[in-house]
Image (spheres, rainbow, N blue to C red):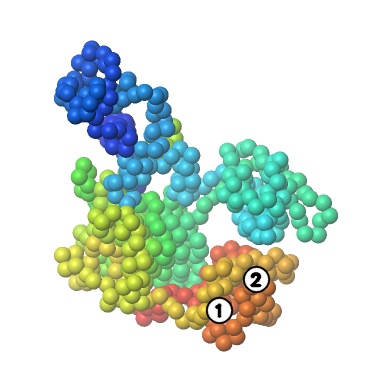
Amino acid sequence: MRIKRDKLIIFLPVIISVALVIGILMGNWLTTIRVRNIVSDEVNRQKFSIRPGLNSGSALSLTPKGNKVSSAIQYILNEYVDTISLSTLNEEVLPALVEELDPHSMYIPAREFQRFSEPLVGNFSGIGVSFNMTDDSVAIINTIPNGPSEMVGVMAGDRIIMVDDSLVAGVNMPSDDIVRMLKGPKNTVVRVTIYRRGEKKPINFEITRDDIPIYSVDVAYMVDDETGYIKISQFAQTTYREFMEAIEKLKAQGEKKLIVDLRRNGGGIMEAATMIADQFLDEGQLIVYMEGRSRPRENDYATSRGILKDDKVVVLIDESSASASEILAGALQDNDRGLVIGRRSFGKGLVQEEMRFSDGSAIRLTVARYYTPTGRSIQRPYENGKEDYYHDFSNRIERGELEHQDSIKFDDAQKFITPGGKIVYGGGGIMPDVFVPVDTTGSSDYYNRVRSLGLMYRFAFYYTDRHRESLEPFTTAKDIEAYLDDHDILNAFVQYAGEKGVKPDYADIRTSKIILEKTVKAYVARNIIDNVGFYPIIADIDNTLQVAIDTLSRL
């Protein structure tokens, strides 16, 4: 996202004010306006010509000879029967103003701006805990290392009873409200009352809020002796730094081949994606270019700083990979630099620019399209409106696209050829070089039932909470998995699910045994050692990742 100050910034407030009137006139005013005692000097000043109205009485039809909208706004402000709050109208009309432009232009109210910006900035101010609502209590899953809560002695497994003077346990308080209470400006103090198992009395803590990092590289680890795996969940201001730190760690462990997982990555800051692409490409190779009606073409080329030019690489994508994810995947695919594996990506090729208002609100406006090195725009059509645009995923399911590659219809007008002679298509996302359908292995009615109720996740927290002392000494996913195997974790889960209303179907359980066990164990491991515990365990049932590992082994 590129923030530029140009003529648009100067004139947009005027345009928005004008648009307010359009909304008022279209929604609330009749085609004729009852006018009484209009001061002739005001009418002349606004350059209105007055002709007899079509209705009876004193109705007059007013036709501005100059700029109709600017005349109308002054007329309404001067003559409307009631006082009009422009601030209120701003919040009502601005969303409608950008609503009609494209699916990704948007107005962000001041009260929502921080929530929208935090993932892109990479941090927020808070107390540094992750928690789960269980049995109407706020149960802490873990504390951020060296964060404010850990520093004062808050521990995983603690229950938050009160925040300042507000009771938060046993009152059905929404988790969003609790988050807002725990967040706050840096260096401010929040009082938290904790219940801890084994303690007779609640424990009071005064926690000084501090900047809490939001990580966009979920995990980086070696899947075998020479293959590294990096999962990027979004592209934020800190993503490139996190990526390079992860590469340094993997290189120290012997990495020569790399899997970059962009599945379910909805994008973010484009520069983070292009800087990562730069690490794989030769100097002078085109990464991406942007062009818009008011924006001349702007090219982004690779530099000489790339340290991954000799590494074999594959990129994993799926139907939720969008925007900056598609830039990175498209840059490597179009330069014949790496293979893309998975399913067709989302198809967002629009560039947004942000303009902030003095009250803290903002507009994110689409100002250009981006194009991959071969010249393809991957933006899928949105001419039929936003409803059709966002129903595309369900349409893909109905067409069978997630199971069969040949259900995807390509437009020859969107056909492009890479320098190496590979055919690629634009106009609707990135199509992978190796298609991997949705894996339904191990699916059953029982599995679908417990998954839809979130019972595997809930059980994992329940189990962790009761076996924390035994689990916490373990530091690797392998050790945690071995412990859980020794303690018959699947049987414990089936019993728990039965207590929650899902009766065991042992035929289905046998069918889904592997996926049930791996998922539960991965969640438990995440509760103890975070994502470095989760991903190595879940990898065994991740079909797309297994295809990537096999593909790299043959390169």
Q: Residue furthest right?
A: 200
Q: Tell me if residue 439 comes above or below residue 323 in the rendering.
A: below
In the shown orientation, is residue 413 left or right of residue 303?
left
Q: Which mark is residue 457?
A: none
Give the labeled residue for mark 1. 446
Q: Tell me if residue 39 comes above or below residue 535 in the rendering.
A: above
Q: Mark 1: which amino acid?
A: Tyr
In the shown orientation, is residue 441 left or right of residue 186?
left
Q: Which mark is residue 500?
A: 2
In the shown orientation, is residue 549 left or right of residue 425?
right
Residue shown at the point (41%, 71%) measured from the top left = 257
Nearer to the camera, 55 or 441 = 55
The crowd level at tag 2 (other Cα within 10 Å; few <14, some 14-19, many 20+) is few
Quadrant of the rendered structure where residue 506 is? bottom right
Is residue 340 in sight in this rendering? no
Q: Tell me if residue 474 comes above or below residue 135 in the rendering.
A: below
The crowd level at tag 1 (other Cα within 10 Å; few <14, some 14-19, many 20+) is some
Quadrant of the rendered structure where residue 108 is? top left
Nearer to the camera, 333 or 555 = 333
Residue 431 rendering spot, x and y as whole percentages = 29, 69
Residue shown at the point (46%, 65%) measured from the top left = 230
Q: Mark 2: which amino acid?
A: Lys
Residue shown at the point (44%, 79%) measured from the top left = 440
